[in-house]
Image: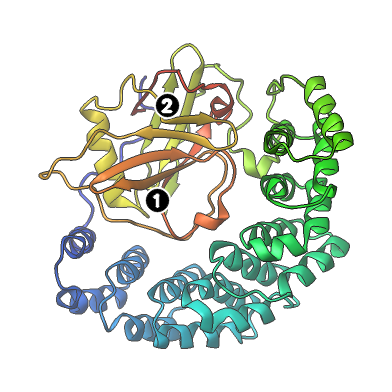
């Protein structure tokens, strides 16, 4: 396929290369303190791109002076997006000094600062739980949502009854974004989920795509008939999102397989399953537009020419996933936020190592997992490059599957619990509905676009 956008600049400025070399060296055992002076100079640069890259490097290599350097930059930084990045990086450090700075930001009068602090506080551990609970009652909806997402990403944090109160309140206020974040956070806490089975059963019927899908995922682990009745209702309603109905069917199959349902309930479950023996994906995606990411293209149709997508003026590279006889998915690589991983993957694609491979997993809900050929001792995988950013349906993740082994995953549903914890390598631009068409036995190819 002819490339429809300019290639990524293969030789970034020397300072960018030095930051990448620092991350690579620390991942292989070098002392991060040796890179602190260069990191400090980069944080003081007039180049906003270089400062952004240095902020991420500080969070990844973690020299002892990182909290001080980032705190000093936060005091003088005027760019709001970079201030968010600094707060997130301080949260990733997780030490006492960093936590103190982030807690101070959580008390700011600026709601954007409080929102960034809420997103970062989850990494600070138990000492941040009280602050996050208070932020669940913040007057700003964005702050409440980020606090709930922090609890979703860190299920070990004590949420008390604050999440239940937030979910009850948001059902009245109709704040969709906080509802699904609260449901995801509750679902990750078995004891709390058991106490809120009724709330989660109601959430399964929520019109929000994410709220419903997260509730349906957890219902089979709960006691009581309320969840079963909710799943039966979702499965039998053809107006619901088709992925909701797939999740409801799997929940009912899980209950039935346990073999301990009362006779009357088991009969209703059997009848519901027999009436919907097969659920087919619709001709058009039935997920919210902001979660779709496919531009509305028809499954299997040749992709339209893509514009040159850029971040701060730099074009980003694209790759294509081809399922033979089923269609294509075009993905854009996060070559600026995860440069080591993007370069490593592109080298492997150019070698032809990703042609005609069989997915380890292919499921419309769980997503697609692609194996990567074993990495030899002379070709170490890149270090993790987590960064801020939503993991939605069609997001490309690079994750470790063992010592010196990596695998690619294309998310089937949003995964907020992984945000900021894994390498987000790219996102689907076109053809995300290919996730619904690929089966476990299909061969696929991943190539540069």
Quick check: 418 left or right of 73? Answer: right
* Residue at 43% from the left image edge and 81% from the top image edge: 74
**SS under mark 1:** loop
Query: Residue 145: x and y, percent?
Result: 67, 66
Give me the C-alpha separation between circle 2 and circle 1: 26 Å
Quick check: 376 left or right of 309? Answer: left
Residue 83, relative to residue 186: is it above or below? below
Q: Which is more toward the observer, 110 or 423? A: 423
Residue 189, relative to residue 65: is it above or below? above
Count of all numbered marks drawn on residues in the image: 2
Of the numbered discs 2 and 1, the one sitting upstream in the chain is 1
- The image's mark for residue 88 is none
> Depth-wise, is mark 2 or mark 1 nearer the camera?
2
Residue 239 visible in the picture: no
Residue 331 visible in the picture: yes
On the rendered image, what quadrant is the C terminus found in?
top left
Q: How busy is the neighbourhood of tag 2: few (under 14 within 10 Å), some, or many (20 plus)? A: many
User: Residue at label 2?
Assistant: 321
Residue 29, relative to residue 90: is it above or below? above
Query: Residue 271: x and y, percent?
Result: 84, 25
Q: Which is more toward the observer, 14 or 313? A: 14
Q: How busy is the neighbourhood of tag 1: few (under 14 within 10 Å), some, or many (20 plus)? A: few
On the rendered image, what quadrant is the N terminus found in?
top left
Query: Residue 94: x and y, percent?
Result: 41, 77
- The image's mark for residue 313 is 1
Residue 421, relative to residue 95: is it above or below? above
Q: Which is more toward the observer, 300 or 251? A: 251
**SS under mark 2:** strand
Query: Residue 386: x and y, percent?
Result: 39, 58
Q: Which is more toward the observer, 196 or 330? A: 196
Q: Are marks 2 and 1 in contact (CB under 8 Å)?
A: no
């Amino acid at each position: 396929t002819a490339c429809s956008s300019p290639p990524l600049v293969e030789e970034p400025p020397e300072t960018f290369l030095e930051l990448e070399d620092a991350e690579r060296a620390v991942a292989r055992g070098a002392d991060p303190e040796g890179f602190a002076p260069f990191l400090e100079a980069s944080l003081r640069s007039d180049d906003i791109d270089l400062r952004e890259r240095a902020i991420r490097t500080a969070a990844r290599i973690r020299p002892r002076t990182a909290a001080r350097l980032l705190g000093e930059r936060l005091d003088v930084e005027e760019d709001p997006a970079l201030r968010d990045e600094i707060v997130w990086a301080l949260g990733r450090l997780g030490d006492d000094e960093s936590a103190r700075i982030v807690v101070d930001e959580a008390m700011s009068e600026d709601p954007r600062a409080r929102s960034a602090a809420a997103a970062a506080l989850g990494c600070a551990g138990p000492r941040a739980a009280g602050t996050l609970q208070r932020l669940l009652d913040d007057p700003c909806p964005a702050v409440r949502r980020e606090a709930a997402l922090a609890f979703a990403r860190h299920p070990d944090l004590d949420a008390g009854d604050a999440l239940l109160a937030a979910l009850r309140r948001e059902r009245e206020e109709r704040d969709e974004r906080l509802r699904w974040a609260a449901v995801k956070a509750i679902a990750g806490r078995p004891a709390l989920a058991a106490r809120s089975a009724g709330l989660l059963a109601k959430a399964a019927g929520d019109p929000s795509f994410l709220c419903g899908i997260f509730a349906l995922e957890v219902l089979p682990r709960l006691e009581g008939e309320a969840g079963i009745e909710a799943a039966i209702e979702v499965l039998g309603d053809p107006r619901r999102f088709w992925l909701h109905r797939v999740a409801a069917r799997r929940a009912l199959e899980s209950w039935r397989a346990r073999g301990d349902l009362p006779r009357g309930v088991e009969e209703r479950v059997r009848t519901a399953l027999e009436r919907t023996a097969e659920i087919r994906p619709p001709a058009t995606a039935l997920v919210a537009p902001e979660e779709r990411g496919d531009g509305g293209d028809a499954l299997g149709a040749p992709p339209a020419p893509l514009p040159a997508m850029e971040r701060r003026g730099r074009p980003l590279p694209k790759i294509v996933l081809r399922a033979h006889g089923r269609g294509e998915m075009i993905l854009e690589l996060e070559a600026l936020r995860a440069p080591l991983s993007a370069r490593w993957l592109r080298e492997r694609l150019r070698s032809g190592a990703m042609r005609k491979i069989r997915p380890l997993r292919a499921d419309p809900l769980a997503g697609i997992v692609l194996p990567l050929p074993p990495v030899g001792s002379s070709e170490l995988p890149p270090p993790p490059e987590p960064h801020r950013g939503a993991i939605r349906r069609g997001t490309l993740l690079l994750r470790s599957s063992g010592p010196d082994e990596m695998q690619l995953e294309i998310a089937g549903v949003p995964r907020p619990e992984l945000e900021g914890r894994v390498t987000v390598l790219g996102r689907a631009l076109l053809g995300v509905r290919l996730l619904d068409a690929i089966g476990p036995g299909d061969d696929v190819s991943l190539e540069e676009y």
